[in-house]
Amino acid sequence: MSTRENLITAAKELLWERGYEAMSPRAVQERSGAGQGSFYHHFAGKAELATTALNEVADEMRETFNAALHSDKPSLERVRDYLKQPREALRGCRLGRMAQEEVLSQEGLRHPISSYFLYTQQEIAAALKQAQNEGSLSESIDTTNIATMLVAVVQGGYVLARALQDPQQMDQAIDGALTLLDTIERR
Amino acid sequence: MSTRENLITAAKELLWERGYEAMSPRAVQERSGAGQGSFYHHFAGKAELATTALNEVADEMRETFNAALHSDKPSLERVRDYLKQPREALRGCRLGRMAQEEVLSQEGLRHPISSYFLYTQQEIAAALKQAQNEGSLSESIDTTNIATMLVAVVQGGYVLARALQDPQQMDQAIDGALTLLDTIERR
DNA sequence: GTCTATAGCAGGATAGAC
DNA sequence: GTCTATCCTGCTATAGAC
């Protein structure tokens, strides 16, 4: 791997572990093995490196998401598959964990985060609509609201798991959502 | 208000706005009008002040929570009232926003946060159980999972609202949860 | 109880040699 | 492209006078 790539990889790790504000250029340099000079040669500064890193993270997460949601299973089953994907609850969401940081005021840094969430909500809403067309879901249900709620359950699961230092919080939240999905399914 | 109380008030505000790590003793001093000397006279350091402040915040939030959940309405209605409480989505949860901070490794600081979430989950689960006893909710539903899920929806609502800089994300997530609650209610 | 002075250290970045 | 030296600022706290 090139020095530049090493820097990005280290940044991705540190952003997950510590978030943006607590990720110091020094720490990135130490973890990547790159020196001060290399850091500022390849990137204008911390913000630019983080932007690059977060965009890669968002791409990876979209791929993971698509793997579950774009299979050839029935629509509602694909939504369930998304909910059931494995998650490292105690580490937090790689993108959602930035939600409380000042970072969000910087347009470039918020973009990968907001566009990822927008994408997942739209795709889930589309799957739910398809379920309505297939007749497995009541037409009276607002698919946008349910999609937003499902993404919120996952993000909230991370928050609770970390706050209580208990990964089962995520499992319980997901199981609750799966239960309710079962209830609204038409068989 | 005493100097000590001014310090605590300023800390509560700053913890909400910036979180623990970004709350500097200097900022607390400036906002409270207290000097360096007063700060370290009343508190051993930043961690002790924050612990005091977070405990007060947790108390206040429990009161707000109880106002909705402990009325004389039917059980499920009380759960809905909790979900419908007004929230400043863009500011984030006063306690949940700390979930990603290193702070959590300090036992004293995590306690007010974790015990608040534990409390809300238990109370909601109790209300749901009561609904089962009253016959308005199917016995087959796991009340613990649903309670955790509902608290997660609120926390996730905050995350999404901030990530997308759109308070409606909270409303949509809540509305989705309310819809599903309606669906599982026995009438 | 409150004030001012000071300390030690880390963050984020620039400068210029190689 | 990479290295070392250096800069300025803010964080968190201690010291000691008043």
Image (tube, coloured by chain):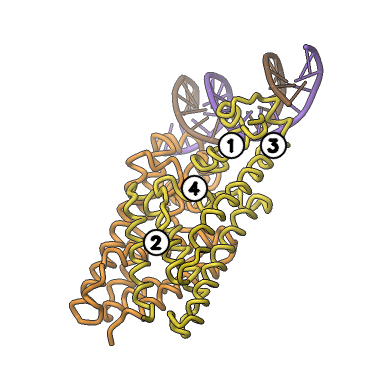
Chain colours: A yellow, B orange, C purple, D brown
Dot 2 falls on a residue whose secondary structure is: helix
In the image shown, does B57 or B169 lie closer to the viewer? Answer: B169
CB atoms at circles 4 and 2 under 8 Å apart? no
Say which quarter of the image contains residue A35: top right
Q: Mark 3 points at which residue?
A: A45
Q: At x 22% / y 71%, what residue is drawn?
A: B129
Q: Is residue B28 above or below residue B62?
A: above
What distance separates the C-alpha of mark 2 from that of mark 3? 36 Å
Q: Vertically, is B131 above or below A19?
A: below
- Residue B52 can be seen in this image: yes
- The residue under label 3 is which amino acid type? Gly
Instruction: Confirm whether circles 2 and 1 share one chain.
Output: no
Q: Residue at x 46, y 81 (%)?
A: A141
Q: Are marks 2 and 1 in contact (CB under 8 Å)?
A: no
Question: Mark 3 or mark 4: which is in front?
Answer: 3
Foreground tag (2 vs 1): 1
Q: Are marks 1 and 3 in contact (CB under 8 Å)?
A: no
Q: Are marks 2 and 3 on the same chain?
A: no
Which picture quadrant has residue B103?
top left
Q: Nearer the viewer, mark 4 or mark 2?
A: 2
Rendering coords of residue A27 (x, y %): 56, 30
> Would you name the residue on which mark 1 appears?
A9
Q: Mark 3 lies on which chain?
A: A
- Considering only order in the chain, which callout, 3 or 1, is on the residue closer to the N terminus? 1
Q: Mark 4 points at which residue?
A: B19
- Say which amino acid is labelled 1: Thr
Q: Where is residue B28 in the image (x, y as percent from the top left)?
A: 51, 44
Helix, strand or loop for disc 1: helix
- Image point (50%, 68%), residue name: A148
Say which residue label 2 marks.
Answer: B152
Which quadrant: the C terminus of chain B?
Answer: bottom left
